[in-house]
Amino acid sequence: MQLSAISFLESDFPYYNQLSPKGKRKFLRRLKRILNTKDFIGRDGLVITHYIRYYIASAWVALTYGLKEYITQEYTQVHVFPDTFYSEQVQAYVKGLTTGKGIIFLSWHDFVEDYKVANNLNVGLHELTHAILISAAFKSNFDDHFSDYYRKFFANTKDDFIDLQLGNPSYLRKYGGANMVEFLSVCVECFFERPAELKEKMPVLYYNLCILFIQNPVNTLNDYKVDDVIVYEIRSSYLDHGIPDEVLDTFANPTTTKIIQKILPVVIFVSLIIFFATMNPIFLMPVFAGLFFMFFHAKQYEDWG
């Protein structure tokens, strides 16, 4: 019997299981689109199964879950080897490789093993991060927010990168000091594998990753959203996080707005009852005003699918 995507996600992908019903629907929509736009090619005799396709595509969805545009049009092929493979490009055996020609190479054995243990090593997330960074840096059709903010991210975290280059003690593994591209991928591994620990040890880096990817992996109760709670935490921090107020403003959803959202349906309902009882058109004013606010708010904070 063919494995279904939902069966796979519920049994083998914890990120999905933490989502709300609405969040799961969003995840599944994106998963379907990734599966329909990427070719998964087996190498060295590996047969591509539904399980392999679902697993790699789900990693892609999780990585880009907060972004509006998550399809890297340049990267259409994922070549999957049974185990580590020899790369002519780097003249060595590797677990993964991302080229500038639209191809991602992965060792299936290492991909699966890295998801079994949260040890800040994840070849899937590592190579997929390369792909979206290359798309954002050298192409023009990736997510606008990510493409605009990644340079700010590097500027705000340059001290962490320099520490790695100098060999200073760091929560991040040394390979992140090779260059800025590897630095981001190493950061992402920690961001998704041990987010609470990264936040505690390197809060400035964590906050900037939250803004770059528009998700907060610690926020498992609210679909990993960058909401007003984390925005308030960033703003009240004494740390020099470097995140501009105007950027934070785009994610803030003040408590006052939440209260209005809850009482508006009641106001509209009561106003309609009074209108039909009195036929006085003045009672339609709060109805139209409420509907306008709800529509405007929905457009401003729309759930990107």
Image (cartoon, rainbow, N blue to C red):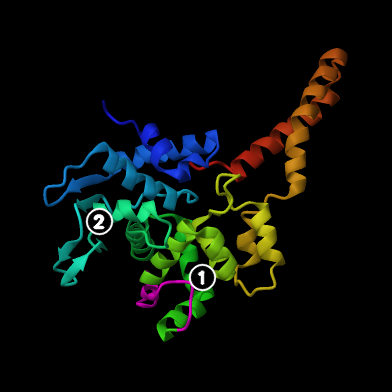
Can you say whether 3 is above or below 73 in the image?
Answer: above
Q: What crowding class fits label 1: few (fewer than 14 Cα within 10 Å), some (14-19), or many (20 or more)?
A: some
Residue 165 is left or right of residue 297, and the answer is: left
Q: Residue at x 48, y 80 (%)?
A: 169
Can you say whether 270 is above or below 113 in the image?
Answer: above
Task: Please identify the residue farthest to the left as the structure is shown.
Answer: 45
* Residue 269 visible in the current orientation: yes
Asked if labels 2 and 1 touch by Cβ distance under 8 angstroms, the answer is no
* Residue 73 visible in the current orientation: no
Of marks 1 and 2, which one's residue comes earlier in the chain?
Answer: 2
Task: Please identify the residue farthest to the front as the structure is shown.
Answer: 117
Can you say whether 152 is above or below 68 in the image?
Answer: below
Q: Give the number of the disc on residue 106.
A: 2
Q: Is residue 129 magenta?
A: no
What is the quadrant of residue 293 in the picture? top right
Task: Please identify the residue farthest to the top as the structure is shown.
Answer: 277
Q: Residue at x 49, y 77 (%)?
A: 160
Q: Quadrant of the N terminus?
A: top left
Specify the segment rendered in magenta: 168-181
Q: Position of residue 142 (x, y in %)?
A: 39, 55
What is the quadrant of residue 278 in the picture? top right
Q: CA distance from mark 1 to mark 2?
A: 29 Å
Q: Residue at x 43, y 49 (%)?
A: 62
Q: Under tag 1, what secondary structure?
A: helix
Q: Under tag 2, what secondary structure?
A: strand
**Residue holding disc 1:** 152
Q: Nearer the viewer, mark 1 or mark 2?
A: 2
Q: Position of residue 261 (x, y in %)?
A: 73, 37
Q: Nearer the viewer, residue 255 or 222?
A: 222
Q: Position of residue 147 (x, y in %)?
A: 44, 61
Q: Nearer the viewer, residue 85 or 160?
A: 85
- Name the amino acid, label 1: Lys
